[in-house]
Image (cartoon, rainbow, N blue to C red):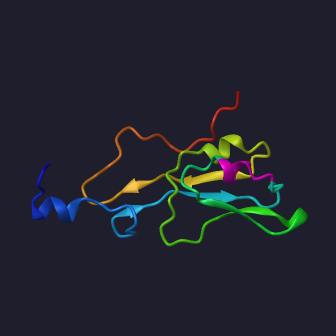
Amino acid sequence: MAFLTLKETITIPTYDNPETCRAGSVTVDREKCNGCGNCVLICPGACLYLAGVGKERKAHMVDKEVPDCMSCNDCAAICKRGAIQADHGYDFGFFYKALHRAEMVPPRNF
């Protein structure tokens, strides 16, 4: 078992602290969304949910201060109507930085 120094313990980011990490985020275009629920089923972070009844049933992102969105873009890939778009990726704080990260682009459809 490894022991961490006080400095290491303080600088390791926690996943649920908005001061040390920035969670991913997606935008749902409710005009295009038909409420099929595929995005909700495929989201590994359980960040999306369906709200409403009948034709008013639409996808929404959870209203937590720090959602569990990891910017995998699976929801955008499965949406046939193109109603979901990733805003920004997950980012660690402090001295951690992402290397070789490209811009967020829509996923390829096969």
Camera-side residue of 44 and 12: 44
Q: What percent of the width, then of the height, locates residue 41?
A: 67, 50
Residue 101: which quarter of the image? top left
* Magenta stretch: dominant secondary structure: helix
Residue 40 in the magenta stretch? The answer is yes
Q: Is residue 82 left or right of residue 17?
A: right
Q: Which range is magenta?
A: 36-41
Q: Which residue is the extreme one toward the front?
A: 1
Camera-side residue of 27 and 39: 39
Q: What percent of the width, then of the height, locates residue 82?
A: 75, 46
- Rendered view: 54 above or below 76: below
Q: Is residue 21 left or right of residue 104?
A: left
Q: What percent of the width, then of the height, locates residue 33?
A: 80, 55
Q: What percent of the width, then of the height, locates residue 13?
A: 30, 60
- Rendered view: 64 above or below 102: below
Q: How many marks?
A: 0
Q: Which residue is the extreme one toward the top?
A: 110
Picture quarter with the C terminus: top right
Q: Which residue is depicted at the point 15% across and 58% down?
A: 8
Q: Is residue 35 left or right of residue 76?
A: right
Residue 64 in the magenta stretch? The answer is no
Residue 80: which quarter of the image? top right
Q: Which residue is depicted at the point 59% across and 59% down?
A: 47
